[in-house]
Image (cartoon, rainbow, N blue to C red):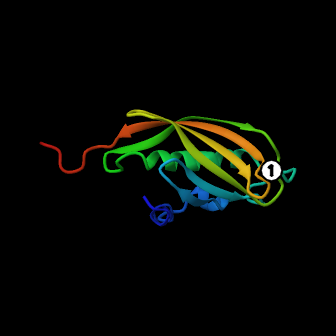
Amino acid sequence: MTLEAIKRWTASRPTLADALGIEITAVTADYLEGRMPVDGRTHQPMGLLHGGASVALAETLGSLAAALRVDPAKHACVGLEINANHLRGVRDGWVVGRATPVHVGRSTQVWEIRISHEETGALVCISRITMAVIDLPATGTSPA
């Protein structure tokens, strides 16, 4: 799927990613990348990037990356578990996340998401998400 097609697909309905200002910036065969502003939408009360916002970026990127690895007419990917290690505080600018596959199997996928400060390149957060690949109901009429 092209970057333009992903942007059209994700723009089809409002999501948490929209509220946080998350943008998808790159998609390749090896990774999916996006960025998020560090501002009032994503700050915690002390003026730093909220850990939950970092996790929301990680889950957005990992979930979308997983969905791109399955046939959307037959399967969907849903989150089973996510964890994050917050390594460095950020007060402003943008953070960039890159989701790379650790395991892409028939029934589960595991993705690592590394989030860095866009300007300095400093690593801010490392997250890992496990996705379940579920079968979608068959379309059409069922036999009566």
**18 or 120, which lies in front?**
120
Residue drawn 78% across and 48% down? 122
In the image, residue 4 above or below residue 119: below
Residue in the image at 44% along x and 64% along y: 5
Other-residue count near label 1 (Cα within 10 Å), few / some / many at <14 / 14–19 / ≥20: some
Number of numbered discs visible in the structure rendering:
1
The x, y position of residue 132, in whole percent, is 45, 35
- The front one of 98 and 138 is 98
Lateral position of residue 133 relative to residue 37, left or right: left
Which sits in the foreground, 89 or 142?
89
Name the spot of residue 54 as percent of width and height, x first: 69, 47
Q: Quadrant of residue 118?
A: bottom right
Q: What residue type is disc 1 on?
A: Gln
Q: Quadrant of the N terminus?
A: bottom left
Q: Position of residue 98 (x, y in %)?
A: 61, 49
Q: Seen from this angle, which residue lies furthest left?
A: 144
Tell me which residue sits at (78%, 51%) in the image: 49
Q: Residue at x 54, y 48 (%)?
A: 31
Disc 1 target residue: 44
